[in-house]
Structure formats: structure tokens, C-alpha cells
Image (cartoon, rainbow, N blue to C red):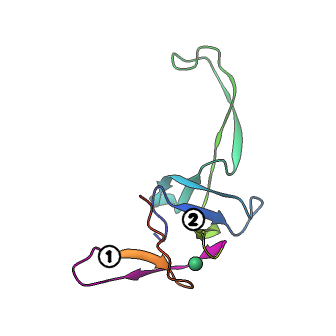
Amino acid sequence: MHVHKGDTVVVIAGKEKGKRGRVLRLLTEQGRVVVERVNIVKRHTKPTQANPRGGILEKEGSLAISNVALWCGKCAAGRRAKVELRSGQKKRRVCSKCGSLLEST
Ligand SMILES: [Zn+2]
């Protein structure tokens, strides 16, 4: 997996191309990812206890993980991450282009 939960990613392919958001969920087995405010689908739901009125609910659908790239704020572009190892420090992911830190906190 090249993205983690909480990462900011940009959609690089498909109908939502260019949208940005945070990774909400990883569906590792399906190779899919759920990104905040991306690929909103309308679900027609029956009333439940959590949602007593039912009706149309808008929620994020999943998209193929290969369609997203990590967002680098400094480059303002989707970038590959590389893992940087400094002695005595934890591994961290940095932008492959400009070297700025991509780790989500
Ligand atoms: Zn960068």
C-alpha cells in the first residue's frame, strides 16, 4: 500500500480526477480506498435507529487505490513517496521530488 489512513491524496485517474482529500478507509483486500469528499454516492436507506428518517444518504464510495497518489503540498502535485531513514529516527515518507515530509500526523 502506497497510501495510509489519514494521508492526503489526489485522484489521478477516473471521473474524480484532480480531487483531493484525506484517506478515510483502506479496503486492502479489494485494493480500494475511501477518500473524504471524493466519489460521493447516494444511498437510498431505510430508516434505522441511527438514522430514523431514512431517505437518501450521501456518502463516500471507494475508488481503486491505483487511481490515487500522495499529495505533496509543496509541489502542489501528486507525488511518489520515498522512505527516508536517518540514523536514530523512525522511517518517514518524503516527497520523491522535493524531499518534504509527507507523513500524516
Ligand atoms: Zn514535493
Where does the image place residue 10, in percent across and percent down from the top left?
64, 64
Most foreground residue, 75 or 43? 75
Tell me residue 53's x, y (percent): 64, 14
Residue at (46%, 56%) from the top-left corner?
A: 5
The image quadrant of residue 85 is bottom left
At 30% from the left and 84% from the top, the residue drawn is 86
Q: Secondary structure at mark 1?
A: loop
Tag on residue 91? Answer: 1
Where's residue 72, x and y in %?
A: 58, 71
Question: Crowding near pointer 2: few (<14 within 10 Å), some, many (20+)?
Answer: many
The residue lying at 24 percent from left, 84 percent from top is 87
Left or right, 93 with reference to 22 = left
Name the secondary structure under disc 2.
helix
Q: Quadrant of the C terminus?
A: bottom left
Which residue sits furthest left? 88
Q: Between tags 1 and 2, which lies in front?
A: 1
- Residue at 26% across, 76% down: 89
| Stretch in magenta | 76-91
- Look at label 2 and name its amino acid: Ile
Quarter containing the N terminus: bottom left
Is residue 87 left or right of 74 when viewed as pictured?
left
Instruction: Judge by depth and name the residue closer to the eye, 17 or 78.
Output: 78
Q: Is 25 a magenta residue?
A: no
